[in-house]
Structure formats: structure tokens, C-alpha cells
Amino acid sequence: MSVFHYLAINQKGEKQKGMMEAENSKHCRQLLRDKNLIPIEVTAAHQKKQKLGEKKIKSKSLANQAMNNKELSLITRQLATLFAAGLPVEEVLTAVAEQTEKQRTRSLISSVRSRVLEGYSLANAFRDFPRAFSPLYCSTVTAGEKSGHLDIVLQRLADYTEQQYQMKQKIQNALIYPGIMVCVSISIVGFLLEYVVPKMVSVYSNVGQALPGITQFLISISAGIKSYGIFLLLALIAGVFIFRRHFKNNLTFREKVQHLWLKIPLIGNATKIINTARFARTFAILSSAGVSVLEAMGISAQLITNIPIRKAVEDATSRIREGANIHLALKQTRYFPPMSIHLIASGESSGQLENMLERAANNQDNSIKQLIDTGLTLFEPAIILIMGAVVLFIVLAILLPIFQLDQLTG
């Protein structure tokens, strides 16, 4: 006799689950009919356990699945459109899953739908997939469900994720040309040091004439790279790997590095603008969705990637909880630009905090775009000048001994 799990319908039309011993699945179904139960599903105990294990593995795999901003914004906009049409949640998720081209994303949306059918709210269903749906996303959806304006909230979320994606794409596209230039320049310099300079050294060694200091220095660099280049490269790769691992796992070390970044003029300014803009944008979205000020600030602070700035905002949240004004608490952090502080103060006094936060975020986004455009504009000529100087140094080091030989023979 084997043990079977069954799902059946009784005479009242209700579903009934249980376990039963039988010789086989056919015998189990017959026993159920003898009890006036209509069998729907009969599974052997060992098969049931295997299916649960497979389901758990699949669920864990989907929970670790990430989603890029482009894909997330598209799905979010589809959700907003369908919710605005008045469709129920399960139909909306079914339509979005059918519209999605990627199989893994379709499986993820289907898993969210399964949880909704099990009784989860939409936001709680999203929370089971943290790599795909951020805390901002889930908290905003929660607020939209409570307020009854889920379509409007999702529309704003879609706009937000699209802006993030466009900004990232703009930076990546702008770095393609400088990146190619750097790679080509390094390859040329490496070729000169590895093959050209050693041949010139063999020529100069037969002359017996003292070489210029610049040439001797270049020969030393070339010899060092030829003898220890592979070891230097391995040491550099190991150093980067150790730094990244330490930076990722050691919170104290990461905080010290990020604090140092804030002191570097250009990098520090960019870090402040990017993080405070993200905070203001998130704060505006959550506030417009009906989330309380303290909760919105707490969630927005968690999305700040720079630890010193995040801690400063968390301290500001504590001061606001004690009764301080929002703009004064944020001003004390010394990370927010004066324009943003004035806009937030105006929003507090006029009762239009959401609009002023949105304006502050837009203002800082414009500052980010200007900073990126300026940095990339200066980056290309800077690379050309640096690489040109390196090549000029190598050429001079090679040609100066030739000029000296010409003078001696002349």
C-alpha cells in the first residue's frame, strides 16, 4: 500500500484535501468515489514531495531574478493602462504576462499572479521578488492600493523608471567613443614599449654614446614591463578584486571610501546631486501616493547609495519625528543644495510639498544632466591630450639619441 495526496469535491461542492492509503492512483480514485467524493487530483506522496521541491527551487530562482529599468518601466506602464481600464488584478497580470516576450519575465509575472490568487495583495506579491521590484516600487504600490489610485501611481513609477533608464543609457552611449580611444591608445603605447623600444635599445647599445635621461627612463620602463608586466597585471587584477569584495562586504570600509569620494571636488559634487535627486524624486512619488512623511522619508533614505548621505538623511528623519521642519532638518545635513531647501520650505509653508519636491528633483536632474554633459565634453579632449603627451614622450625618447648621433657625425 502507498500513501496518496488527493484533492476532491464533496457533495456540497466544496474542495477537500487529504491523504489516503491505496494500492495505486486508480484504486485511490475508486475509494474516493465510494466516499461520495469526486477526485480532481491524486498524487503519490513521494511525487508530491518532489513537486514541492521543484516548485521551491523555481520560486527561489525567480526571487533572485533581476529586471532592468527598461523592462520594468514597460511592464509598469502596461499595468497602469490596464488598471485605468478597470480590469481586475488577475486579468491585468495575465494580460501583461502574455504581452511579455522573455520567458523568465513571463514566469515572474505569472508567479506574482499566483500569489494574488492565493490572497496576497499586489504589493506583497511584488515583495516576494526583491531583485525585480525595489522597496520604493512595493511601498508605492501599497500606497496606491490603499488610496484607490493605483493606475496613477503606476504611471508615475513608469515615468520614474524610464528616466533612470534614459539617464543610464545616455552615460553608456557617451562613454563608448572615449572608451574605444583609451583602449586603442593603451594598445599603441604597449606595442611601442614591448617591440619598438627594445629594438632601439639594441641599436643604441652598439654606439657607446651616453643616452639622454629621458631615453634611459623609457628604457627602464620598457624593461620593467617586459620583465614584470604580467605580474603587475595580475597584481592589479587581484587588487581590484580584493577592493571590490572588501567594498561590498565590509560596511565600515565602504562608508570610509564613500566619505572620501564626497571630498573629491567633481566626484563628490556629482555624488551629492545624484543621491539627493533620487531622494527628492522618491519622496515626491511616495508623498503623492498618500504615504506619510516619516514613512516616505524612511523609504527614500534607503534608496540612497552613499552611506554618509543616507545616515545624514536618517538623522534628519529622526529630527522631523521630534517636531523639526523638513527643510531645516535636511539643511542640517549639508548635502542638499540651497535651491532644493528653498523649494521644500516653500512647499511646507504653502501645503504643496509634493509639487515642490517634484520641482526640486527636476532641478537636480537638470544639474546632473549638465554635469554629465560637461564632464563628457571635457573627457574626450583630456584623453587625447594625455595619450598625445605619452606618445610624444616615447617619440622624443627614441629620437633624441638619433639627433645626438647626427651632431657627432656632423
Image (tube, grey):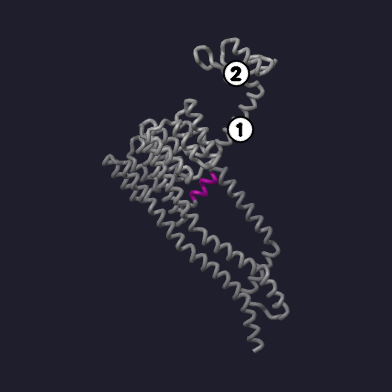
- Which callout, 2 or 1, points at the residue further toward the start of the chain? 2
* Residue for point 38% across, 34% down: 144
Question: What amino acid is at disc 2?
Answer: Tyr
Can residue 297 be seen here? The reply is: no
The answer to whether residue 219 is magenta is no
Q: Residues within 10 Å of mark 2 (few under 14, many from 20)?
A: many
Secondary element type, mark 2: strand
Extreme residue in the left direction: 350
Near-viewer residue (312 or 294): 294
Q: Is residue 370 left or right of residue 249?
A: left
What's the CA distance linking mark 2 and mark 1? 23 Å
Percent from the top left, x then y, of residue 384? Answer: 52, 67
**Disc marking residue 57:** 1
In this rendering, is residue 237 above or below 251? Answer: below
Label pair 2/1, CB-CB below 8 angstroms: no
Q: Does the magenta stretch mainly form a helix, a strand or a loop?
A: helix
Q: How many marks?
A: 2
Q: Is residue 247 left or right of residue 141?
A: right
Query: Bounds of the magenta span?
Result: 252-259
The answer to whether residue 258 is magenta is yes
Residue, disc 2: 6
Q: Residues within 10 Å of mark 1 (few under 14, many from 20)?
A: few
Secondary element type, mark 1: helix
Extreme residue in the top direction: 35
Extreme residue in the bottom direction: 410
Percent from the top left, x then y, of residue 286? Answer: 38, 38
* Residue for point 63% across, 83% down: 404
Question: What amino acid is at disc 1?
Answer: Ile
The quadrant of the image that shows the C terminus is: bottom right
The quadrant of the image that shows the N terminus is: top right
* Residue for point 71% across, 81% down: 207
Percent from the top left, x then y, of residue 182? Answer: 56, 63
